[in-house]
Image: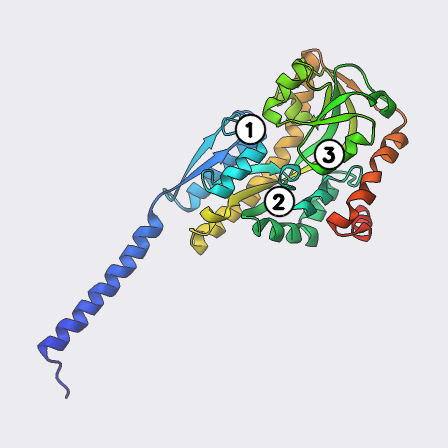
């Protein structure tokens, strides 16, 4: 029988303690609380904030004490582009964004912004959960944005100071646009002068005459109280405003596999919750806007609206993957 001498026994014991200690350190490191600063453009009553309250609850249920969500509300951290820069730099860990505002980094996202391409919210969802969505997520990841799921803000409609139902009535007007080449091209096609203004500065721009009109979803129309400065909403529904729930790559890379899975699952569930909330919030928002003097109008000569806008398809076909890809999405 081989005997283990005292010195060898001590070495084996020390090695065992070191192994146990190392695994303990790993567990301790993983168990520390991670702070997650989240930027929201709205207050607690809007879907843009409710989604993060939902995500934080779901994460806490799976990983108690592992994450602390600090949701900074009401656009206090800036508009979408400023927030995106903060996420890339690491000062903000997560947010939502329209694809329009991220198209400066990933131009291919503009395929989701093409006017009169999507029939309804279900059509959009089929596309973003398929190959197109997967490809766009990959391109966002290459720009330091970890997009865990897509969301739907609803259709965009025209907002004006004076009633506008025909596209020709827009000629000569100054229109606030998302700072995106596609949106600029779209409204230029109708004879307007596009002015790129962050959403957080839009109310003042409209109130002071910097802009005469804009387009936006029904939910955000009420959220920013824009019915006070552009009381007329023409229900053009020209663009279905897609967005993403996203995290910064620097933050994401620090997570272990379990943390990534829990955050991803919670965010996907949050995205579906958000889409449901938007539908409900639109009805409430329209009711509020009407009670405050807002007016809903139906567009006239809808074919003219579509004809003026669809020239954008040809202009951006090369950017978004070709006209055949656009037609395939149209038929999906």
Residue 160 vs residue 236, the one in the foreground: 160
Mark-to-mark CA distance, 2 and 1: 21 Å
At a point 83% along the width and 44% down the height, the residue shown is: 314
Q: Secondary structure at mark 1?
A: loop
> What percent of the width, then of the height, locates residue 75?
53, 27
> What percent of the width, then of the height, locates residue 209?
69, 15
Q: Which residue is mark 3?
A: 183
Q: Which-is-in-front pick, marks 3 and 1?
A: 3
**What is the crowding at mark 2: few (fewer than 14 residues within 10 Å), some, or many (at least 20)?**
some
Res 41 label: 1
Res 105 label: 2
Q: Taking 303 as reference, is 41 left or right?
A: left
Residues tagged 2 and 3 counted as in contact (Cβ below 8 A): no
Task: Give the mark nearer the N terminus: 3 vs 1.
Answer: 1
At a point 53% along the width and 31% down the height, the residue shown is: 40
Q: Where is 255 relative to 246, above or below? A: below
Q: Secondary structure at mark 2?
A: loop
Judged from this view, the residue extending furthest toward the bottom is 1
Mark-to-mark CA distance, 2 and 3: 15 Å
């Amino acid at each position: 029988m081989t005997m283990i001498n005292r010195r060898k026994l001590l070495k084996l014991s020390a090695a065992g303690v070191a192994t146990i200690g190392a695994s303990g350190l790993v567990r301790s490191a993983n168990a520390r609380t991670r702070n997650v600063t989240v930027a929201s453009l709205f207050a607690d009553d809007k879907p843009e904030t409710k989604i993060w309250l939902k995500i934080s609850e779901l994460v806490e249920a799976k990983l108690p004490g592992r994450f602390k969500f600090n949701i900074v509300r009401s656009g206090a951290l800036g508009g979408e582009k400023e927030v995106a820069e903060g996420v890339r730099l690491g000062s903000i860990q997560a947010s939502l964004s329209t694809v329009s505002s991220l198209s400066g980094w990933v131009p291919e996202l503009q395929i989701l912004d093409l006017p009169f391409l999507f029939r309804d919210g279900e059509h959009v969802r089929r596309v973003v959960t398929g190959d197109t969505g997967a490809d766009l997520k990959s391109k966002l990841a290459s720009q330091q944005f970890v997009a865990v799921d897509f969301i739907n803000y609803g259709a965009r409609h025209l907002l004006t100071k004076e009633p506008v139902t025909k596209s020709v009535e827009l000629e000569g007007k100054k229109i606030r646009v998302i700072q995106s080449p596609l949106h600029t091209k779209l409204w230029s096609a109708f004879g307007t002068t596009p002015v790129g203004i962050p959403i957080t500065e839009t109310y003042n721009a409209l109130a002071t005459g910097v802009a005469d009109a804009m387009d936006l979803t029904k939910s955000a129309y009420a959220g920013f109280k824009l019915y006070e400065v552009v009381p007329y909403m023409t229900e053009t529904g020209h663009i279905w405003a897609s967005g993403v729930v996203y995290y910064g790559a620097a933050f994401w890379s620090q997570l272990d596999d379990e943390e990534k899975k829990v955050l991803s699952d919670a965010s996907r569930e949050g995205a579906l919750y958000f889409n449901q909330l938007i539908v409900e919030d639109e009805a409430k928002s329209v009711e509020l806007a009407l009670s405050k003097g807002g007016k809903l109008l139906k567009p006239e000569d809808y074919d003219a609206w579509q004809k003026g806008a669809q020239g954008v398809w040809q202009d951006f076909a090369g950017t978004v993957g070709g006209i055949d890809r656009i037609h395939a999405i149209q038929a999906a």
